[in-house]
Amino acid sequence: MEKINEVHVPHNTGWAGELKQDQVIRISATTTVDFVCLRRQNLRERFDQARTKVYNMKLFITTGDKLMGRNNQHMMTILADGFKEGTHDLQKGMCSGYRFQLAKQEGRLGEYYPRQINEIPDHGCYENLSKALAPFGIIPEDIPSPFNLNQHMKIDGVTGRMEHTQVRPKPGNYMELRAEIDLLVALSACPDLPVGGQPVDVLIYEP
């Protein structure tokens, strides 16, 4: 393979970059990564959680499944998924400093997170993605709800209740996705309060 770009994304920061059709992005991480993509020629065409779930007819997507856009366009294909211990999330949005503060004020940190949280961060994935995408003219309100890699959630099939877990990948884990159209992609190395976040490594290559 021919390496096009390689990036180290520190804990609780974001990154954005261009991905041409047929190029592949490898995202290596052991904690949650909030990932979004937008059509490069029309940045209003964005990844969509609901379209992705309906097209693949399942809540949990993996190798061979497609990431779909709001207009039902095929944006990306998952080529490899190393997270065998759990599943990826297509239900949640982005964490944020305000969301952490609100949960603390309401005394709900223990309800949301399966471990003791002694200190909450002042920002999260909403701020990270907003900062990363700002140079491309994307305002925060136009950032789609993300594909949350490595965020294993318990979902009750009867009540629909969701629960955070501490299930995360082992070291060496990565996901590879191929661009089916020219894209702008962005990700956040989530603070991932259930386990404590870690940095993310990104590799873009021509297959």
Image: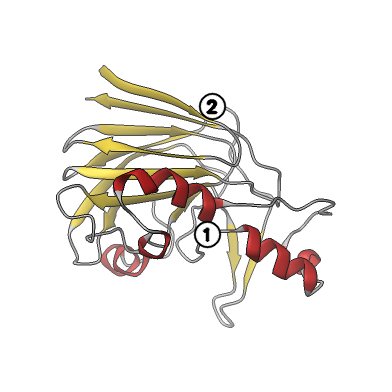
Is 67 rendered above or below residue 63? below
Horizontal side of 80 relative to 101 (left or right) equals: left
Is 102 rendered above or below residue 113? below
Residue at the farthest top position: 2
Quadrant where the N terminus sits is top left
x, y percentage for residue 72?
19, 65
- Judging by the rendered image, the residue that carries numbered circle 2 is 172
Quadrant where the C terminus sits is top left
Residue at the farthest bottom position: 159
Query: Where on the picture, by quarter, is residue 71?
Result: bottom left
Residue 63 seen by the camera: no
Q: Residues within 10 Å of mark 2 (few under 14, many from 20)?
A: few
Residue 54 seen by the camera: yes
Q: CA distance from mark 2 to mark 1?
A: 25 Å
Q: Amino acid at mark 2?
A: Gly
Residue at position x 33%, y 34% in the image: 25
Query: Where on the picture, by quarter, is residue 179?
Result: top left
Describe the element under mark 2 as helix, strand or loop: loop
Residue at position x 46%, y 47% in the image: 131
Q: Which mark is residue 94?
A: 1
- Select label 2 or label 1 by which is in front: 1
Query: Where on the picture, by quarter, is residue 184?
Result: top left
Q: Residues within 10 Å of mark 1 (few under 14, many from 20)?
A: many
Q: Which mark is residue 13?
A: none
